[in-house]
Image (spheres, rainbow, N blue to C red):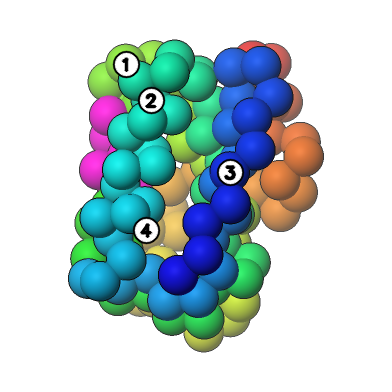
Amino acid sequence: MQISTSRNGGAARVELKGEFDLGSAPDVERELSDLERDGHHLIVLDLRELTFIDSTGLRSILAADARARREGRRVVVVPGPPTVHRVFRIALLDQRLEFVEDPESPQGANGDGD
């Protein structure tokens, strides 16, 4: 798993490449926790380069989303390839999480104008 993070003011984009599973989840969770602790109000998870995600990866994303909602922040997800996004659809998480097609334009998603 490769994790690349870019920051722009109160927003951060985390690009994940490879397999998001039991072995890589602690690294992703640590990166997300660091961004939360640093006060980023928006975290964009870019999954376009993922080749695989398991239930541990899903749990990590759901946990980050739940923390963000509790604290008045946002986590948005750029969908991965069809084989990866299929896992979200099967678990009905495509209805629970906020997905955006363009990682550069989530500020205006859902009309909140962050």
For label 2, the SS is helix
Closer to the eye: label 4 or 1: 1
Residue type indicated by callout 4: Leu
Q: From the image, tell me which residue sits under label 4.
A: 93
Q: Residues within 10 Å of mark 4 (few under 14, many from 20)?
A: some
Q: Label 1 vs label 3: CA separation?
A: 21 Å
Residue type indicated by callout 2: Glu
Which is more N-terminal, label 2 or label 1?
2
Q: Nearer the viewer, residue 44 or 87?
A: 44
Instruction: State the image quarter where residue 70 is shown.
Output: top left
Q: From the image, tell me which residue sits under label 1.
A: 71
Q: Quadrant of the N terminus?
A: bottom left
Picture layout, residue 90 above or below residue 9: below
Q: From the image, tell me which residue sits under label 3.
A: 5
- Assess whether mark 1 and mark 4 are in contact (beta carbons under 8 angstroms): no
Q: Residues within 10 Å of mark 2 (few under 14, many from 20)?
A: some
Instruction: State the image quarter where residue 21 is shown.
Output: bottom left
Q: Residues within 10 Å of mark 1 (few under 14, many from 20)?
A: few
Check if residue 112 falls in the magenta segment.
Answer: no
- Assess whether mark 3 and mark 1 are in contact (beta carbons under 8 angstroms): no
The label shown at residue 34 is none
- Assess whether mark 2 and mark 1 are in contact (beta carbons under 8 angstroms): yes
Q: Residues within 10 Å of mark 3 (few under 14, many from 20)?
A: some
Residue type indicated by callout 1: Glu
Residue type indicated by callout 3: Thr
Q: Which residues are magenta?
A: 61-67
Where in the figure is residue 23, as x and y percent of width and height?
A: 25, 71
Q: Label 1 vs label 2: CA separation?
A: 10 Å
Residue that appears at 51% across and 65% down: 2
Residue that appears at 32% across and 33% down: 33
